Amino acid sequence: MPEILPLSIAADELARFRASAPLVHLLTNEVVQEISANVLLAAGASPAMIVAEEEVAAFAAHAGALLINVGTLYPARLSAMRLAVAAAVQADVPWTLDPVAVGALAYRTQFCRELLASRPAAIRGNASEILALACEIDSADGADGADGADGVGGRGVDTLARSEAAIDAARQLARTSGAIVAVTGQTDYITDGETVWATPWGHPLMTRVVGTGCALSALVAALTAGAHSRTSRLNAVAAACAIAGLCGEWAAAESDGPGSLKGAFLDALYRLDPEALRGRAI
């Protein structure tokens, strides 16, 4: 059974992350660039969004981490992503995949399936996306009955499946891809294929602000910077989910609606103190 992540682990990961203040290369959904950059700045990282094919490889190789978010995918962006991932792998820079709407649309589903061969450090998606991506691996391996995009409960970028329904798929995806897999929802589940951490924090109002999920993927990527072992990456990804969820709860308590939530969420990230987090009772 999944265990709730001890906040002492989240506090340790936050302190490590803040001490390094990593440079994070974001090749992300064009709709969410502003909130993703501001979330990383508030948390303590340095975001950059280099997108030209002529520059992405050089930049990705020097970054502390790379995010690939396929939300607004088109041929030029796809080519830039291929170049960035190849450079990151060559330079041993951890990269994170956010498989937005995989399973619902064939173009991005095939591209994300291709990217799995480049061994992402982390994958962050909703239940439908993780179920679909796991099905894609089974299909590639010739498993009977695997159909990729069918029957996994997706509706574009939304999910119709609960996060707990994808725990087994997340475990399988983690084992086959080598990534730490986070399936997010009302409760987030983060796994290396064996251990499963649960982070049950957050607030429904977060779903009314565009980009909070994509910004979480950026935070996941940022915390993988400098986390070299599989255990440290598991803890780093789980810490990112815990931090975002807790800050979302605190922000919602201070907000009147989605507009004020966004500012309060950034403020909560900025104010979050590792020692206070370590001392908080679950």
Image (cartoon, rainbow, N blue to C red):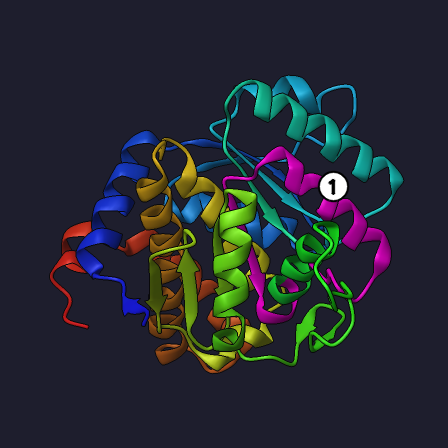
Residue at 27% of width from left, 45% of height from top? Answer: 13
Residue lying at the far left in this picture: please name it: 279
Q: Quadrant of the N terminus?
A: bottom left
**Residue that badge 1 annotates:** 114
Rendered residue at 35%/79% (across/down): 253
Circle 1: residue type: Glu
Q: Is residue 236 above or below residue 64?
A: below
Residue 35 in view: yes
Total number of numbered discs in the rendering:
1
Residues 47 and 161: in front is 161
**Which residue is at the front of the view, 159 or 17?**
159
Placement of 57 over or under 11, stated as above or below: above
Query: 77 or 249, which is in the foreground?
Result: 77
Q: Secondary structure at mark 1?
A: helix
Identify the image quadrant of residue 116: top right
Residue visible at 67% across and 53% down in the picture = 137
Residue 107 on the magenta span: yes
Q: Can I make out residue 38 in this image? A: no
**Eyeballing the image, is 220 above or below 262?**
above
User: In which quadrant will I find the C terminus?
Assistant: bottom left
Query: Is residue 260 found left or right of 208 in the rendered image?
Result: left
Badge 1 crowding class, 10 Å Cα cut-off, few under 14, some 14 to 19, many 20 or more, is few
Q: Is residue 61 left or right of residue 272?
A: right
Taking 164 as reference, is 195 above or below it?
Answer: above
Residue 28: say if magenta.
Answer: no
The range drawn in magenta is 100-129
Q: Residue at x 78, y 19 (%)?
A: 54
- In percent of width and height, residue 48 lies at 58, 33
Query: x and y percent of residue 52 in the render?
Result: 77, 27
Q: Position of residue 94 (x, y in %)?
A: 50, 33
Locate residue 136, reporting x and y percent: 71, 56
